[in-house]
Image: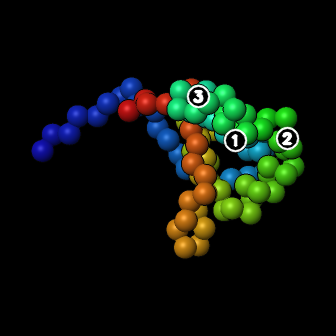
């Protein structure tokens, strides 16, 4: 069988979350909530979910670290993130609006 490879699809690498990912993952979360989800939720719902004025980077990092988070990168740049607990439960999974639907 001859499989065709789409060379336009970016290569995604998955690695454990680290402190240096805090600002990028928080920006991905805010972008996904305020941009990607904007057509599915009211402005009031978006504001209540995103709460950008209430987000603090050290608290974000502590929560990400506690949730066993992973970061998806494209060319070394964070493109999304998720987490998984020991039982397989996923609490968060977000992709930067910049990387939506590449294939």
First in sequence, mark 1 or 3: give its number: 3
* Element at label 3: helix
Give the CA separation, mark 3 to mark 2. Answer: 19 Å
Give 54 or 57, whichever is nearer the viewer.
54
Residue, disc 2? 54
The residue under the point 79% across, 35% down is: 52
Q: Nearer the viewer, residue 57 or 74?
A: 57
Rendering coords of residue 17 (x, y %): 68, 53
Q: Position of residue 26 (x, y in %)?
A: 73, 40
Residue 67: image quadrant is bottom right
Vertical position of residue 103 compared to residue 61: above or below: above
Mark 2 packing: few (<14 Cα in 10 Å), some, or many (20+)?
A: few
Q: Which residue is mark 3?
A: 38
- Residue beneath the point at 87% across and 49% down: 58
Q: Is residue 77 left or right of residue 87?
A: right
Q: Tell me how far mark 1 sits from mark 3, CA to CA.
A: 11 Å
Q: How many marks?
A: 3
Who's the residue at 53% across and 45% down the image? Answer: 13
Up the image or down, 72 lies above or below 4; here it is: below
Residue 21 in view here? yes
Residue 94, how many percent across, how many down?
A: 58, 43
């Amino acid at each position: 069988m001859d499989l065709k490879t789409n060379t336009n699809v970016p290569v995604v690498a998955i690695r454990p979350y680290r402190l240096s990912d805090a600002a990028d993952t928080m920006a991905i979360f805010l972008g996904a909530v305020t941009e990607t989800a904007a057509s599915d939720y009211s402005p009031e719902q978006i504001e209540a979910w995103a709460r950008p004025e209430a987000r603090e980077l050290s608290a974000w990092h502590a929560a990400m670290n506690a949730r066993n988070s992973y970061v998806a990168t494209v060319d070394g740049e964070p493109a999304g993130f998720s987490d998984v607990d020991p039982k397989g439960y996923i609490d968060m999974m977000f992709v930067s609006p910049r990387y939506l639907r590449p294939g």
